[in-house]
Every structure is written in C-alpha cells, then in structure tokens.
Image (cartoon, rainbow, N blue to C red):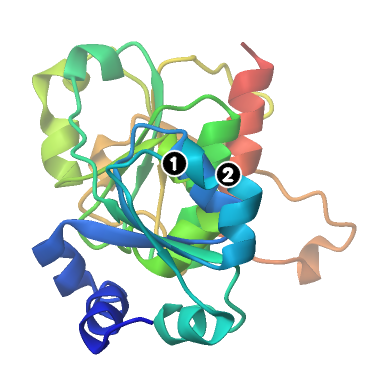
Amino acid sequence: MLSKNQIKQVTGLQFKKNRALEHCFVAEGAKIVPELLRSKIIVRALFGTADFFEKIFLETIPESIEKIIVSELELKKISSLSTPNEVLAVCEIPVHSLINSELKNQLSIVLDDVRDPGNLGTIVRIADWFGIANIICSPETVDVYNPKVIQATMGSIARVNVCYMDLKHLFSNTTFEHDFSIYGAVLNGENVFEKRLNQTGFIVIGNESKGISEKLLPHINEKISIPSFSLNQMDAADSLNAAIATAVLCAEFRRRK
C-alpha cells in the first residue's frame, strides 16, 4: 500500500518547483516507461500494477530501481492522467550540455517562447523522427519535464537533448555570428520549398500566437515560410500550429539531404 508520503512526493513532481528541487520528473504509460528503461535516463522508482510487472518481467529491471506494485486505485492517486496506464516512473532529470563546435555541424531546433505542452512534446517527437539531436529553448518555453510534455513525447525524450538558455546570447556567440544559417519561420519569409537549404543551422520556431520575438529577429539571417495552398486564399487559415510547422520544415530540410 502506498504511504501518504509516497503519494505526496510523486504528485508533487507535477509542479515545476518540486521537479527542480528533487531533480526528478514523472513519466507514465506502458509505451513510454519501457523506452526510458532502455535509455540512459536514470529511473529511480517504478509504481506499476501486477499485470505490468508480469508483462515486463520483473527480473529484467535493474536492482537499483525501486519497484512498487500498486493497485489501479492507488495508481490513480499518483497519476496526472484521467485514465492511468499500468505504470508510473520517477526518473532523474538528465544534465545536458551544448557543445558549440558540434552544433555548428548539425541541424538543431530552437524554440522561442513555445507555451503549449502538447506542442513541445510533439516537437521533441518530431526531432527524434528526423534525427535532430538538440532542441534549444528560451527560458519562457514550457518545461520539457512537465507531465503533459513528457506524455506527448511518447518516449522520444529519451533520445533528444532539450536545453534552456538565453537565445539572444546563443545567437550572439561568435561561433554562430558568421556564415551560419539561422532559419526563422516567419509569415513574410521565402518559400521553403523553393529556397536553398543547408543541413547545418538553427530552425527557429516562435510563440504560437506572437511568432519569433522582436529581440531575436535581427539575428535571423534566413527567413523562411510555408506557403498556403488553400483554394480560397482570401479565407484561408492565417497560420499553422507550431508543431505542424516544425514537422513540415524538418521534412523539407531532410528531403534535401
């Protein structure tokens, strides 16, 4: 049976300030948790139903991981999901570092003030699919270890490095000041399907409603956009969802590879 202290500790990780204090986050579900167990992310504890542990073979889980068998009712008490899914894992937040010389030779995603947890989680999944190793976020971007974000990544959080930093400081770095492509997704940009694209650089995605912030626009040296093919241009959608736009752009970059 779960103690009141265990319930308090696990549910507390739904809040950013507690995640920062404990250096831990929560992941849920029989799809996501096994992926984390196979990754470099350190899993501290598993709270799972008897059926889950039977399916995953208890003896294959490292002894260092605390394993607690819980009932469906107990799982519901610590879950952030409306319908809990067999298992909940408490994991250590990994420490990621960015090496400028490596970024210089890669394609990376930069997120400026993306607030929606579903968008961020989906973008992490998109980066994983298209082989993009790093996502660099502004401090205002939603916390990647928010339970809703983790859920939306569907396990891709185990394979993509997500870091937070001052983006103006990043773009002002001498490594990226000259001869480095900083692609900004803006409404008045060049048609991405017709523009010459490099396989190194930053793809910058802005806030869902405001776009890329004014303070960063001077650093964007390659403005790109996704053209609308609507049959009724006068009454077409004014923009794409941030995650969908990221997927289209990544697909076009990789198509050229």
Question: Are dots 2 and 1 in contact, CB under 8 Å?
Answer: yes
The amino acid type, in three-letter code, at marker 1 is Ile
The image shows residue 248 at horizontal and vertical percentages of 65, 40
169 vs 137, left or right, is left
Residue 79 appears in view: yes
Point 74% across, 50% down: residue: 228
The amino acid type, in three-letter code, at marker 2 is Phe
Say if 97 sits above or below 65 in the image.
above
Q: Which residue is mark 2?
A: 57
The image shows residue 143 at horizontal and vertical percentages of 30, 61
The image shows residue 218 at horizontal and vertical percentages of 24, 41
Say if 140 sits above or below 108 in the image.
below
* Real-space CA distance between mark 2 and mark 1, rounded to the nearest whole angstrom: 7 Å
Quadrant location of residue 42?
A: top left
Point 49% across, 14% down: residue: 198
Q: Which residue is mark 1?
A: 61
Pick the front one: 10 or 220: 10
Quadrant location of residue 37?
A: top left
Point 18% across, 21% down: residue: 177
